Image: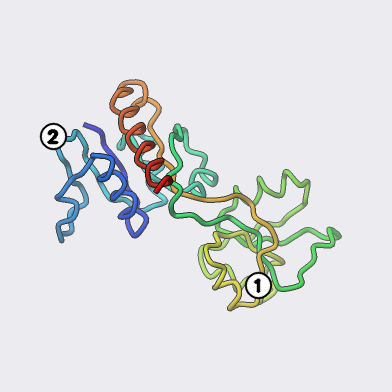
């Protein structure tokens, strides 16, 4: 039995549809109830819904064999897992944004508001730029407006929220999409099942691309 951690919400539902299309359906997951764990013994799969940011923890610690999470989570928390596949869905980007016409003159320590502390640190370390991280958990867009920070590092999908707050994307840190990850021990001891799942998902994704 392969234990599969799916992120709750729209992305998880989208990704489950892909598993289903690849031949790993589990009809009970579509029933209208509050259950969190669903299995199809015939297909050898057990799915469960978890908070998107927790998927990598379940996989890393072996409660799930495989899971689906965004590249943002993998980059921020750097879990000890293997990344097997890019689903090319849930596409957005991690970006630096700031007030319109903002120019970093490099003369002072750059104040960066973000909830993705490690992503921001790694990005600016590569540039050799001295920064002061201001860790926030929400409403990050207002930080530069109120003078709390110079810029923000955050996930940008359409950019609408930024525009409404008179902010612009300054540069992209890295692209984000949903990834299939696997627990290292599971990859060793359930190799055939994991590789079969990955191959079927890859074939299904390639077929979709050709359509």
At 55% from the left edge and 72% from the top edge, which residue is drawn? 160
Among numbered discs 2 and 1, the one appearing first in the sequence: 2
Pick the front one: 97 or 201: 201
In the rendered image, residue 68, in percent from the top left (x then y), is placed at 38, 44
Above or below: residue 202 compared with residue 121 = above
Is 106 left or right of 21, judged from the image as shown?
Answer: right
**Circle 2 sits on which residue?**
42
Q: Mark 2: give few (<14), some (14-19) or many (20+) Cα within 10 Å.
A: few
Q: Residue 156 in the image: state x and y as whole percent.
A: 55, 62
Specify few, some or many for label 1: CA neighbours under 10 Å numbering under 14, 14-19, or 20 or more.
many
Name the side, left or right, on which 203 lies relative to 149: left
Which is more foreground, mark 2 or mark 1?
Answer: 2
**Cα–Cα gap, marks 2 and 1:** 52 Å
**Label 2 element class:** loop
Closer-to-camera residue (89/93): 89
Q: In the figure, 170 relative to 57: above or below?
A: below
The answer to whether 66 appears left or right of 130 in the picture is left
Compared with residue 170, is residue 141 higher up or lower down, i.e. above or below?
A: below
Type of colouring:
rainbow
Q: Residue at x 21, y 51 (%)?
A: 36
Q: Residue furthest front?
A: 211
Q: Position of residue 135 (x, y in %)?
A: 59, 59
What count of labels does the image hold?
A: 2
Residue visible at 37% across and 42% down in the picture = 207
At x 45%, y 32%, the residue is 82
- x and y percentages locating residue 2 in the rendered image: 25, 33
Circle on res. 55: none
- Circles 2 and 1: CB atoms closer than 8 Å: no
Q: Which residue is mark 1?
A: 167
Disc 1 on helix, strand or loop?
Answer: strand
Quarter of the picture containing the N terminus is top left
């Amino acid at each position: 039995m392969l234990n599969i951690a799916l992120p709750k919400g729209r992305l998880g539902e989208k990704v489950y549809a892909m598993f289903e299309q690849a031949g790993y359906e589990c009809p009970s997951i579509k029933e209208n109830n509050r259950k969190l764990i669903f299995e199809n013994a015939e297909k050898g799969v057990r799915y469960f819904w978890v908070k998107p940011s927790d998927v990598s923890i379940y996989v890393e610690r072996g409660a799930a064999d495989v899971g689906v999470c965004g590249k943002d989570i993998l980059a921020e928390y750097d879990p000890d897992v293997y990344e097997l596949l890019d689903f090319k869905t849930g596409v957005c980007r991690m970006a630096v944004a700031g007030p319109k016409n903002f120019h970093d003159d490099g003369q002072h320590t750059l104040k960066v508001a973000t909830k993705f502390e490690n992503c921001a640190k790694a990005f600016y370390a590569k540039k050799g730029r001295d920064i002061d991280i201001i860790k926030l958990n929400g409403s990050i867009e207002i930080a530069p407006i109120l003078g709390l920070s110079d810029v923000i590092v955050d996930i940008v999908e359409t950019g609408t929220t930024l525009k409404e707050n008179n902010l612009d994307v300054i540069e992209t840190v890295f692209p984000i999409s949903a990834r299939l990850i696997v627990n290292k021990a599971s990859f060793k001891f359930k190799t055939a099942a994991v590789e079969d799942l990955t191959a079927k998902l890859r074939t299904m994704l390639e077929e979709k691309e050709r359509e």
